[in-house]
Amino acid sequence: MFFNKMKSVSTDELQNMLKDKPAIIDVREPYEFKNGHIPGAKNLPLAQVDTYTGKGPVYVICQSGMRSSSATKKLTKMGVDAINVKGGMNMWKGARK
């Protein structure tokens, strides 16, 4: 059996791309999103990922990388060019200190 490797980037790599205004979806719950998110990110909780209508590329982030990994897999199966952000907002905050 063959496995497709999921595309991913680090938070540092994503931070360096922000000037180009990439599409970013944050799959955390709305209350988490309100407590801080990447500028320009759209909130689309994991339970609603199957409603995403964009094509990609889209960068997917959550708190730690677990939900975004799951969302990235779902989106990829839907034909979306989705890229997981490794480490999630935990790493993003660390990169911003």
Image (tube, rainbow, N blue to C red):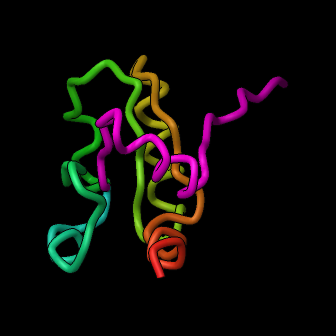
What residue appears at the point 53 percent right and 72 percent down from the top-left corner? Answer: 95
- Residue 47, relative to residue 17: is it above or below? below
Residue occupying the far right of the picture:
1
Pick whichever, 24 or 66, lies toward us.
Answer: 24
On the rendered structure, is 92 left or right of 56?
right
What residue appears at the point 46 percent right and 32 percent down from the top-left corner? Answer: 82
Percent position of residue 84, x then y: 52, 45
Q: Quadrant of the N terminus?
A: top right
Q: Quadrant of residue 39?
A: bottom left
Percent position of residue 3, x then y: 76, 29
On the rendered structure, is 16 left or right of 26?
right
Pick whichever, 30 or 34, lies toward us.
Answer: 34
> Magenta part of the protein: which range?
1-26
In the image, is residue 12 part of the stretch drawn in magenta?
yes
- Residue 74, relative to residue 42: is it above or below? above
Percent position of residue 6, x then y: 64, 36
